[in-house]
Every structure is written in structure tokens, then in C-alpha cells.
Amino acid sequence: MSSEVQNANNHNSVSILNDTLEQFKAIFYLAKGKRDTQIKLYTGNKVFCRQNVIDLNDKIEKKLLNYSVSNKLTSISINLSGNNIKSYGNWNEFLCETWETSEKTETITINWDFEMILPNRVHTLPQTHSLKVRLGNELKPNEIFHMMIVGGDEFELEESQAQMVAKVDFVNDRIATELLAIVNDWYNLLPENVAKKDINEFLEKHGVKLRMVMEILIILSGLLLFYPIATFFIINSESSPMTTTKYLKYSFFIINGVFLSYTIFTRVSAFYAQKFNITMSKLRDKPIFMFTVGDKNEQEKIESKNKGLRREIYMKLLISFISSGILFALGFTVKMIIEYI
């Protein structure tokens, strides 16, 4: 019996110690303005619209109803093209915005700041927590390059390249885990940023192989151009008495012909492959935001441009195939001209 009482007393002592430690952390962080932080990076390819952001806020608000929240502030900031930023300190103001603008959305940052009193605690001191969700790549490529040159923490570079970042500043880690779980489930349910029958991903994935095939076909076209001419000299060498002079002469023509054909058409294939790479690099992904009228216009513009670029890529590949047959026929034409002369 005494051992049970002793275990109960020990358990109560541990609970009081944890509560005291948690209270001390709350007071210390309140005085210093420093809390523990947990960050989750998302590197997928999702599409964000206005309703998605509203749904996320509804989920967070519903979760906070389970706790005694004394103060709560929800703010949202939208970074638009042209260095224009719209910031709303009140959520209702954001809901009233129509977004009838030609500017494009670049990043969206949502902040939830709240103080809560956790249940079953000895102290009643409100604990300050905050959740920040940033949608969109915050840094441009040239800014990322500058960060790499100047030097910065590795996690900062990874955070700048992520499509979405969720960051929780907390005193109680259970709250942080629950909030990040809500954000994670919400993100996983978002639609993928991939159009039906979109082949951009296929071209980007197999672009190196397609370029290699195209280069080989162009080089092969040059050899096919010289092949009928080479057979002309070989047949003549077999039908007539072969002397050392004729042998050296025919060997000279054949070797130099192969060398020149290979060299010239290797240069041509390299030039053509460079043009192919430039066209491939111009393919763009669809915008990840569908907030403003400008976002919708940008999507239509990108789809139209990508369609023209894909047509150009198909033509380059088709020309590399057709050129083999054309140059082979041209080689026979040159052979007939030589025989006639």
C-alpha cells in the first residue's frame, strides 16, 4: 500500500515538475520573444486558388476551437507582380476582395497568431503560438544564386526553393504537431499542377535522349550523302586494273570524304541540338496560383506558347528524320552526275 502511495506521489511530482517547466518556458519566451520552431517544406507541384486558402483557414479555426484561445489574429499578405503587395490584417477584408486585377500572384503568406491556455495545467498563463504558411517560391533564381555566392544556411536555401513552407513557433509541441498535420493533409488534397495530356514533362524527362537521336540522325545523313559517291569509286576500282596510283587516289577520296562528311555534319548536328535545347528551355509550367484575372490570363498565354514550342520541337525531330532520306537521294544524284561526266 505504501509503495502505491509513493508511486502516486512520484507521478504527481513529475506532473507538477512538467507543468512548472512549461510555465517557466511560457514566461521566458514571453519575456524574450523566442520560441521553439518546427518547419515543414513542401516541394510538390500543386495549384492554389482562393477557395483553397479559405478552406485551410477554416480547418485551423476549427482546430483552435478545441482549446481555450484568449487572443487570436489571422493576417494574410499577397505579393503581386509589379512589386505590389496587398496585406490584410483582418480575414473578412480578404474575403471581400474580388481580385479583379491583371496582376499575377507571386507569393501568399498567411499568419495565425494566438494565445491559448492549455487544459489540465497548474498554471493559467496564456502560451503564445503562431503558424505561418508561405505559398510560392519567395526568391527568384538570381536571388537564389546570390544567396549561394554570399553564403547562407543550407535550410534557408532549401526553404527558398520549396513551393510551400509551413512554420510553427510554439511552446507546447503537441499543438505544433497537430497544426502541421492539418496543413499537411490540406496540401496533399490539393490538385496537381498538371494539365490533361500535357507532354511537357515527357519532353523534359527524355529531352537528352531525343537530342542524342537527332544528332545521330543528322550525322548519319551526312554519311548517307557520301555513301553513293564512295560506292562509285569502289565499283570503278574493282572493274578496272588497280594500280598503286589509282588505289591511293580512291583511298584518298573515300577517307577524306568520310572525314569531311562526319566533321561537317557533326558541327551541323551540334548547332541544331543547341537550337533544340533553346526551344526546350522555353517550355514553362502552368502558374501555381489561380487567384486573380491576371493568373488566368497568364495560364492561357503559357498554354498557347507551349503549344507553339512543342510544334517547333516536333518539326525539328521530323526534319532530322526526313533529312536522312533526302541526303541519301541527293548522294545518288551526285553519283549519277559524276558517272555522266
Image (tube, rainbow, N blue to C red):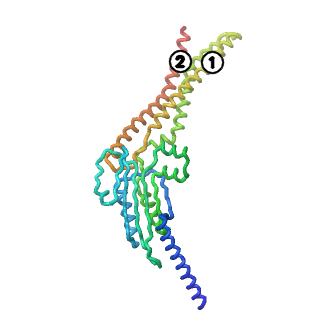
Distance from Cα at disc 2 to Cα at disc 1 = 19 Å
The extreme front residue here reads 31
- Which image quarter is the N terminus in? bottom right
Q: Residue at x 43, y 44 (%)?
A: 285
Q: Position of residue 68 (x, y in %)?
A: 39, 73
Q: Nearer the viewer, residue 9 or 310?
A: 9
Q: Is residue 62 left or right of residue 7?
A: left
Above or below, comparing residue 43 to residue 311 in the picture = below
The extreme top residue here reads 341
Depth check, mark 2 against mark 1: the one in front is 1
Q: Position of residue 314 (x, y in %)?
A: 45, 34
Q: Residue at x 51, y 22 (%)?
A: 327
The extreme right residue here reads 244
In the picture of the structure, the residue carrying the numbered disc 2 is: 332
What amino acid does circle 1 point to? Asn
Secondary structure beneath label 2? helix
Q: Is residue 274 left or right of residue 101?
A: right
Name the disc covering residue 256, or none: 1
What amino acid does circle 2 point to? Phe
Q: Position of residue 210 (x, y in %)?
A: 52, 36
Secondary structure beneath label 1? helix
Question: Can residue 177 be seen in this snapshot?
Answer: no
Name the disc covering residue 5, or none: none
Question: Can residue 291 be seen in this snapshot?
Answer: yes
Q: Name which of mark 2 and mark 1 comes first in the sequence.
A: 1
- Which image quarter is the C terminus in? top right
Above or below, comparing residue 293 to residue 305 in the picture = below
Above or below, comparing residue 161 to residue 186 in the picture = above
Q: Residues within 10 Å of mark 2 (few under 14, many from 20)?
A: some
Q: Position of residue 225 (x, y in %)?
A: 55, 21
